[in-house]
Amino acid sequence: MKRAGASLAELSGQPLTRPSEFRSGLIDQWEAAWIKPVNQLTCEEVLCLFSQGSGLPWLADPIAEFVESYPDAETAFYPGDMTIEALRQFDRLKEADARAARRIELLDLTGLIESAFSFSRPLRREAESLYEAIKSQCA
């Protein structure tokens, strides 16, 4: 069993052997988060990893818990950003942890989608479409 306080690099057995030659804020944040102990990751770092499909076997349950508790939280960009990422990454989340995905599936996000994403019609449409697709899978 892996030790408490391990990083995703340690848990996955995939160390960051050579930093990317390409530099950007996203790459810098991802690399720093990948080698940071999981129990010390910020919500913004989790969102960064999650949006890249990284570490889902270890992050799926905490992500589902966060989205259940704080669906409209602004972790990095806008209110509900972790929630819409959970909708975007739903199939990957389900593959990594079916119970975590089920927790997302059971949420009633209708009101959240209407209010939290009202500032952007395209984002609201995307959220509605993703949410409807997930709901139709479980119907």
Image (tube, rainbow, N blue to C red):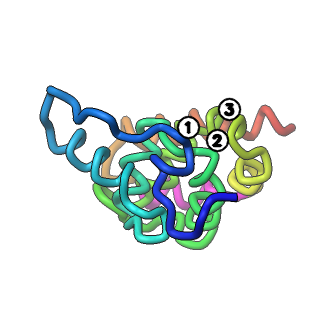
Q: In x, y percent, where is residue 3?
A: 59, 65
Nearer-N-terminus badge (3/2): 2
Judge depth for marks 3 and 2 and give the one in front.
2
Magenta residue check for 110:
yes
* Disc 1 from disc 2: Cα separation: 6 Å
Sequence-earlier tag: 1 or 3: 1
Q: Is residue 51 above or below residue 72?
A: above
Which residue is at a point 60% across and 53% down the rendered structure image?
58
User: Which residue carries the number 3 mark?
Assistant: 133
How crowded pointer 3 is (Cα within 10 Å; few <14, some 14-19, many 20+) is rated as few
Q: Is residue 50 left or right of residue 120?
A: right
Amino acid, disc 1: Gln
- Return the residue at label 1: 89
Is 59 located above or below residue 14 in the figure?
below
The reply to whether the C-beta atoms of the residues labelled 1 and 3 are less than 8 Å apart is: no
Q: In the rendered structure, which amino acid carries the disc numbered 2?
A: Leu
Give the secondary structure at mark 3: helix
Residue at horizontal 64%, vertical 41%?
Answer: 93
The region drawn magenta spans: 107-116
Q: Nearer the viewer, residue 19 or 93?
A: 19
Count all numbered tags in the image, as a single digit.
3
The image quadrant of residue 67 is bottom right
Element assignment for label 1: loop
Residue type marked 3: Ala
Residue on which the image places disc 2:
93
Rendered view: 79 above or below 50: below
Foreground: disc 1 or disc 3: 1
The x, y position of residue 55, in whole percent, is 52, 45
Q: Give the image location of residue 138, x and y in percent.
A: 83, 39
Q: What residue lies at 42% left-to-right and 36% top-to-bottom?
A: 52
